[in-house]
Image: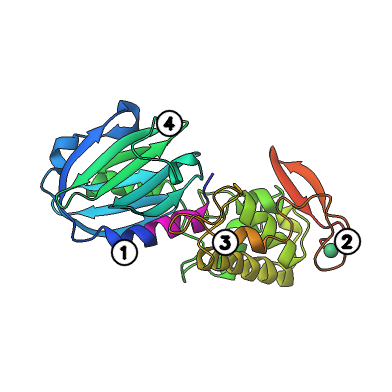
Amino acid sequence: MPELPEVETVARRLAQVLPGRTIKSVKVLRNKSFQGKPVWLSGKKIENVSRRAKMIRLHITGKRDMLIHLKMTGQLIFMNGEKKIGGGHPTGDWTNDLPSKHTRVIVEFTDKSTLFFNDMRVFGWLKLVDDAQLAVEYGKYGPDVNIEEVTVEYFKKVFANRKMPIKLALMNNSVLSGVGNIYANEALFIARVHPARPANSLTSKEWKNVFQATKKVIDDGIKAGGTTFDGKFVDVSGLAGKYQEKLKVYGRAGKSCPRCGTIIQKMKIGGRGTQYCPHCQK
Ligand SMILES: [Zn+2]
């Protein structure tokens, strides 16, 4: 599942190519994937692309914008001639001809370029939203982890009284948006805090370390264009990311800790695979 850095990467790439283009038509191939009236978009221009939580927003002229959630397996691929740009879940659709059997929505522009929404598992969605509906969607999530307003004081305020494992606390999107499984594992390794520690047991110094490490892994993830795991697609330019090369514990159980050489262990916390160094993380 794409996390914040992957979704931010897709939004930034689309922001390079979509603004200024006029929608000719929107073809919905799977009704479950699209909420709203596609015909409303005909003749409208895309003004901007942004991200909030793990949603991508296409700012469109007029009263409604398009909000997109990739969920588990969604992809957004913009095609102009042979050139592809975008991203999301890596599959053969990154390299195969489009549309494919996973294409759920096709946005055609007046200049013959096209935006494909592909989604193997069909959990993702595109939604036309007015300002009130947008506020409802955005209101479901806490502030994005990578904004300035999120400080170490904010971390302490929302997490420090909780008994749950620190890793689960960080991943609670209703109070802090954007820390998923990969980046929570990496942040706690950098902060030297054991992922199962009750949140209310952390010291002030540990909160500072966890806060700084969380910001760092998210920033580094965005700089690297997110994480792409499928080996077949890691070099597909315009669609893949490079953060997988920087992972220190995630996906590395059984290998040695890059800091001390101890074997990385694996456990389940809240049902999610959790990797940590039993020596470095207390
Ligand atoms: Zn270690």
First in residue order: circle 3 vs circle 4: 4
Judged left or right of residue 267, residue 143 is left
First in residue order: circle 4 vs circle 1: 1
Mark 2 CB in 8 Å range of ligand 1? yes
Give the spatial CA distance, label 2 vs label 1: 44 Å
Q: Position of residue 235 (x, y in %)?
A: 54, 57
First in residue order: circle 3 vs circle 1: 1
Magenta segment: 3-11
For the residues carrying marks 3 and 4, which lies nearer the camera in this image?
A: 3
Determine which residue is flagged by label 4. Answer: 122
- Reply above or below: 34 against 243: above
Q: Quadrant of ligand 1?
A: bottom right
Comparing 70 with 207, the one in front is 70
First in residue order: circle 2 vs circle 1: 1
Picture quarter with the C terminus: bottom right
Please give the name of the residue rendered at 78% of the width and 57% of the height, measured from the top-left corner. Answer: 194
Residue 197 seen anywhere in this rendered image of the structure:
no
Secondary structure category for the residue under label 1: helix
Mark 1 CB in 8 Å range of ligand 1? no
Residue 273 seen anywhere in this rendered image of the structure:
yes
Determine which residue is flagged by label 2. Answer: 279
Give the spatial CA distance, label 3 vs label 1: 19 Å
Q: Amino acid at mark 3?
A: Lys
Q: Main secondary structure of the magenta part?
A: helix
